[in-house]
Image (tube, rainbow, N blue to C red):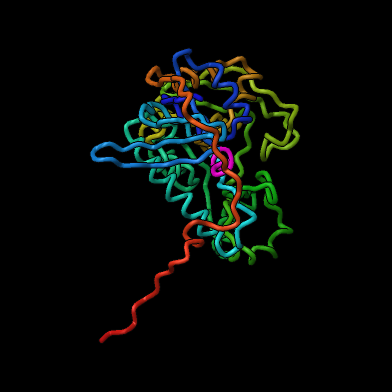
């Protein structure tokens, strides 16, 4: 069995192609560990122990390999998976277990404050908020489309009237069950505006653009890719037209400065920006994805983005050794949890005498 002190933690799925590709770009002396929250309790278990002044987090996988998280130097918050539910547990217990998982790992993650994060958890969470993105983009000098984020039909109607209905709308997020791209507002939708009270929507003025930029920034390195959208068959969201391709491009020093300022202001080290160039020559900030995909850009342009990510995550602080004494462990699903199995239950003492 192995005993490992990883230098680089990667949170996501082992089958994620971005992770697989970046792993191949790490330096030989880097010791990575992929942590998939959806496999917690199945493929691995974990402990956090304090002993005097010593504080240690240990992970053991189902093969008995032990990972001591005492040398973590780099952390990639790639795309963490949600904790999976143990279907053998009673339904009323599952939310409690999920919250205990979040609290445990939230505490463990806070101990890596000295590590270099891509990106810091709190800053990643804040910059993932689209309203906050627009605020910061405006502060650093980017032009942004007129925007109305609302659950108020009257606010939406005023915004639509101001822009003569030349407006697009989109959501904050999406899921496997419900996802739609950016769509144009049509006058036939007017009677549905009252449904906004159920869920807010992002409305923005439509910018007629012939050029779109996807800009990946890693630790100050800028990789710009451009897509000619003049002949797009769906100009409201060019992701829909799969025939369009990116090509390597460059940005003015002024725009690069704005990107650096955005990264510095938001405190993130990785970001995938979407910018568009209008027919009138104005560059607009649309959004930034703090965990945006980049392999498709690399495949289309030849830009060495994964190599830059690998270099940023490389560290020689980890170690690997052999420990024959460790045994394989079983992480089979149980049908109840320790706190509920123990027989001694404590209740309130209501005798006030």
Residue 135's place in the image compared with 10, above or below, is below
Find out whether residue 140 is within the magenta segment.
Answer: no
Q: Quadrant of the rendered structure where residue 278 is? A: top right
x and y, in percent, of residue 35 in the image: 52, 35
The x and y percentages for residue 159 are 56, 56
- Residue under the image location 62 percent in, 50 percent down: 169
Which corner quadrant holds the C terminus? bottom left
Percent position of residue 103, x then y? 43, 50
Q: Nearer the viewer, residue 55 or 98?
A: 55
Asked if residue 144 shows in the view, the reply is: yes
Q: Which segment is the magenta one?
A: 36-43
Give the vertical position of 92 relative to 41 (above or below): below
Residue that appears at 37% across and 20% down: 317
Residue 285 visible in the shown view = no
Which residue is drawn at the image coordinates 52% and 49% (left, top)? 147
Q: Quadrant of residue 246?
A: top right
* Image side of residue 250 versus residue 264, left or right: right
Left or right? Give the position of 38 relative to 120: right
Count of numbered circles on the image = 0
């Amino acid at each position: 069995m192995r005993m490992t002190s990883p230098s680089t933690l990667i949170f996501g799925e082992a089958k994620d192609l971005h992770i697989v590709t970046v792993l191949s770009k790490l330096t030989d002396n880097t010791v990575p560990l992929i942590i998939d929250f959806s496999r917690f309790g199945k493929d691995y278990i974990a402990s956090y122990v304090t002993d005097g002044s010593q504080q240690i987090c240990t992970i053991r996988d189902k093969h008995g390999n032990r990972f001591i998280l005492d040398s973590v130097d780099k952390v990639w918050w790639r795309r963490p998976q949600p904790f999976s539910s143990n279907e053998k547990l009673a339904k009323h217990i599952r939310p409690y277990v999920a919250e205990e998982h979040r609290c445990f790992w939230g505490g463990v993650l806070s101990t890596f404050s000295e590590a270099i994060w891509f990106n810091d958890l709190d800053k990643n969470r804040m910059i993932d908020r689209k309203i906050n993105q627009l605020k910061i983009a405006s502060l650093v000098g980017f032009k942004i489309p007129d925007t109305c984020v609302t659950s108020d039909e009257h606010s939406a109607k005023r915004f639509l009237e101001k822009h003569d209905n030349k407006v697009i709308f989109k959501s904050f997020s999406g899921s496997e069950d419900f996802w739609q791209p950016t769509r144009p507002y049509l006058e036939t939708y007017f009677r549905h505006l009252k449904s906004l009270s159920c869920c807010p929507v992002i409305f923005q003025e439509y910018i007629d653009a012939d050029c779109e930029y996807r800009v990946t920034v890693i630790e100050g390195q800028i990789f710009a890719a451009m897509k000619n959208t003049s002949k797009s068959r769906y100009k409201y969201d060019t992701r829909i037209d799969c025939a369009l391709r990116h090509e390597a491009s460059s940005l003015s020093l002024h725009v690069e400065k704005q990107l650096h300022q955005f990264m510095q202001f938001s405190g993130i080290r990785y970001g995938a920006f979407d910018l568009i160039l209008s027919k009138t020559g104005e560059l607009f900030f649309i959004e930034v994805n703090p965990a945006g995909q980049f392999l498709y850009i690399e495949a289309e342009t030849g830009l060495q983005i994964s190599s830059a990510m690998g270099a940023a995550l490389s560290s020689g602080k980890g170690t690997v050794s052999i420990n024959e004494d460790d045994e394989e462990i079983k992480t089979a699903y149980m049908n109840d949890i320790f706190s509920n199995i123990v027989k001694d239950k404590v209740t309130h003492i209501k005798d006030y005498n």
